[in-house]
Amino acid sequence: MIRWFKDVGSDHLALVGGKGANLGECAAAGFPVPPGFIIDTSAYTTATESIQAELIAAVDKQDIEQAQRLVRSVTIPADLRAEIEQAYAALGDHARVAVRSSATAEDLAEASFAGQQDSYLGITGVDALWDAVRRCWASLWNERAVSYRRKHGVPSEGLALAVVVQTMISSDVSGVLFTRNPMADNTDMMISAAYGLGESVVAALVTPDTFTVTREPVTVVSQTIGSKETRIDMADGAETITTPVPPGDQALPCLDEQAIQQLVALGQLVEEHYDAPQDIEWAFADGELYLLQARPITTVASTDAASVEGHSPVRSRVERTLRNDLMEHYPTPYPLDLVAVHALQESIQDSMRMIGLKAPSAHEIIVGDDDGVIRIHAQAPRPDVAVVSRLPRTFVKGMRHDPTRWPAEERAAGEVLSQLARRAGACRDASDTEVVVLLEQILAQAAQLMSDRFFYYLAPMTVLRSKAKALIRLARQSDHVSTEDLYEDLDYVTANVLAGIRDLTATAQASGLVDVFTETPPEQIEDALQSAPDSARFLAEVDAFLQRRGARTACMYVPFSHTSWRETPQSLYELIAVSLRGQQASGSEVTGSAVTGSAVATVEKHLPRLLRGSWRTTVEKLRASHVGREGTLYAIEEVLVLARTAMRELARRLVDRGVLETADDIRYLYFSEVTDALRDGVSRGEVVERRRRQRGTAEAVWWDRGETADDADAITGVPGSPGQVVGTARIIRTPADFGRLQPGDILVCPFTDPTWTPLFDVASAVVADIGGPLSHAAIVAREYGIPAVLGTGDATSRIKDGEKIMVDGRKGSVVVVG
């Protein structure tokens, strides 16, 4: 049950957990790892065997305190106690140790549980050690860990936890080393350092010094001296103690040139050993360098992709689909958007890796050059041997997740949002580094929501939808019922938004404000409403609506070049104007509950009796998953509103310091350039102006597929929604064009996202350059019963505004008829 570091490695992950396996691997490789041992998972299983029934019962009753009390009070078997005490004695007389939980991959790898269990520092003596071990074991059942497992569908039975016991280094300086700068397209290393123990850096308790260092020769190319107000050290009679750092030491770098040389040398050795960039925790004590932990960096910038011109040629249908999907999700990003694009897309790439596919990093497939032109290098993921075990396990975990729990998950996400919002609201008083760190944490939260959305809603929905279609076919109701019919009476985000806009439209009409919307230029509507008589009720309803659903954002995944309705109400007013012109001010839901109830009952009636229960369960889960799918998307929008708040503050500072002329100019800088500008204060006017001149080229490159149509007369695409319509083509490229759409027009556009949904109330059909049968445009068009042809590639350039066209949504064709 006791395993010394030198005796374990990655093959022992299930027994010693991730932290233990990494420390063993590093120790065996000869790196300067402080000595220690691991109390493996079998010790926990043995010690808690007699309380398992009570423990699970307490968790099922959500009595977390009782569950932890049970574990903290377990009696350690005599043979286990003797084995652990012997190992502790081998570390030295009354050795000071760190006692840390080490979670196993089976429990944690697919649900990002990192940080849910506890660690204890400065433990001395056998009694204190036993107390810390029990507390680590009990942390497996703390509120955070239990809630997180419940959210991600991990059962309580069979869980176990390893515990790492490691000699503590009384460090003078410690911190973190990234062997690749995660914010730049090069091989530089990045070091964060502070006085005392590394907890202050890892847990972000202080603002550390930050050094960017080249490898050969080792040169500090930039450094930021953090405030380092406090330090954590080991202390007599206590585990650790926090003390203030003298002002003179705060102003000095805590690492000298020799220490940086040593760190770079260690970083290169560890990176070479693992053959991958590494995130290393380290410490200096009495002049000696120690490696405390090493783990791979999952996202680093590509070093060579930026030199490739144009979108890489696609080599397969899969790569073409991936490229087009990226173009639709991240339309014409500005350089600043790339930091969010990478964070969000990396969560998708990581999801592919978790199911056993070899997927490149987001930095490799979406790359920006020095002119601000961003290109796609689509690479199809390749199956790894691990896919055989990982794919079924991940699939089962996703399907086990209960989608009806979304309201509780939404509240939990709301709590995180509130915490981030408080910090964003106070960022004007924060340091540059603190705002940058906040921004990175906000984007990390958005990425986590993206990952959860994929695993627990989108992936299961694919299976549930296929099952529902199969049952509908079995009932021979395919001509009468589609899966979209099953969503029509749901109270999900988009339906809620549409109902809200219709209510606002009705209020505008009732308040005599129709002329304000239909006769006033879009950019003047907001001012006109303020001075219009009888507008008070309408404006109050607008405020309430924006509080509820105002985070809705056009092109939400490129958040720094677009704003939400809450931030820029003009875009909401333009939608209301479209709705008024279309005479859609009914103030009611799109459909009534009877439609769905009838569809469900009709299919059930025609199914064999043995399959009716399965049909009802499938419909319930599919509907709940749809609500969660929409809810997670809106949760990401709310988080990205906060990202813009933090970024606006950085833009304000750069304008005040003369680095930029206007706040909007920040869009033309990559995020790494923003952080550099905050440090050096040098004007970026030339860079901004050069990229502004290249912006037209950047947009043309983004939409260029390198493909032409075979038939000069017909435009073909993917059938998205059946039906045939002849009407006037209206080219709508951005939300700024929304006001041009007239009732009965055929909407011809590059793509759509949820902010375009109200246009489907007005349009008679939809034609899009990008999209597939499961894209936003297809789903909404089917809900509204209008034809849609998607993925045409170039409809917006081949069709002229105002031309008469015929759309055949079943064949997927568009023909100009006059």
Image (spheres, rainbow, N blue to C red):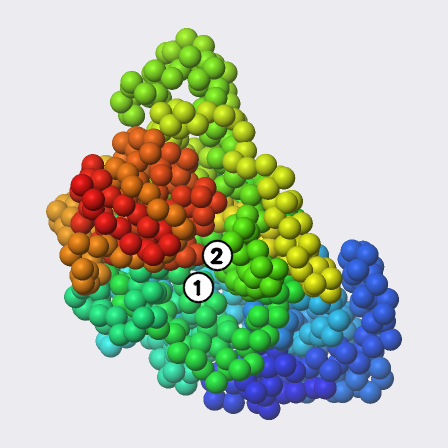
- Residue at 50 percent across and 16 percent down: it is 537
- Residue at 55 percent across and 48 percent down: it is 485
Q: Earlier in the sequence, mark 1 or mark 2?
A: 1
How far separated are the C-alphas under marks 1 and 2?
8 Å
- Crowd rating for badge 1 (residues with CA inside 10 Å; few <14, some 14–19, many 20+): many
Q: In the rendered view, tell whether residue 250 sits above or below residue 239.
A: above
Residue 273, numbered circle: none
Q: Which residue is mark 2?
A: 450
Residue 548 falls left or right of residue 657? right
- The amino acid sitting under disc 1 is Ile
- Residue at 35 percent across and 21 percent down: it is 517
Image quadrant in which the C terminus is located? top left
Q: Position of residue 110 (x, y in %)?
A: 56, 69
Image quadrant in which the N terminus is located? bottom right
Q: In the rendered view, tell whether residue 346 sits above or below residue 290.
A: above
The answer to whether one can see residue 183 in this image is yes
Q: Position of residue 592 (x, y in %)?
A: 59, 36
The local secondary structure at tag 2 comes to helix
Q: Position of residue 418 (x, y in %)?
A: 55, 42
Pick whichever, 103 or 316, lies toward us.
Answer: 316
Pick whichever, 563 or 122, lies toward us.
Answer: 563
- The amino acid sitting under disc 2 is Met
Q: In the rendered view, tell whether residue 457 sits above or below residue 414.
A: below
Residue 698 falls left or right of residue 236? left
**Number of marks in picture:** 2
Discs 1, 2 touching: Cβ within 8 Å: yes
Q: Which residue is mark 1?
A: 348
Locate residue 84: give its quadrant: bottom right
The answer to whether one can see residue 236 in this image is no
- Residue at 30 percent across and 63 percent down: it is 323
The local secondary structure at tag 1 comes to helix
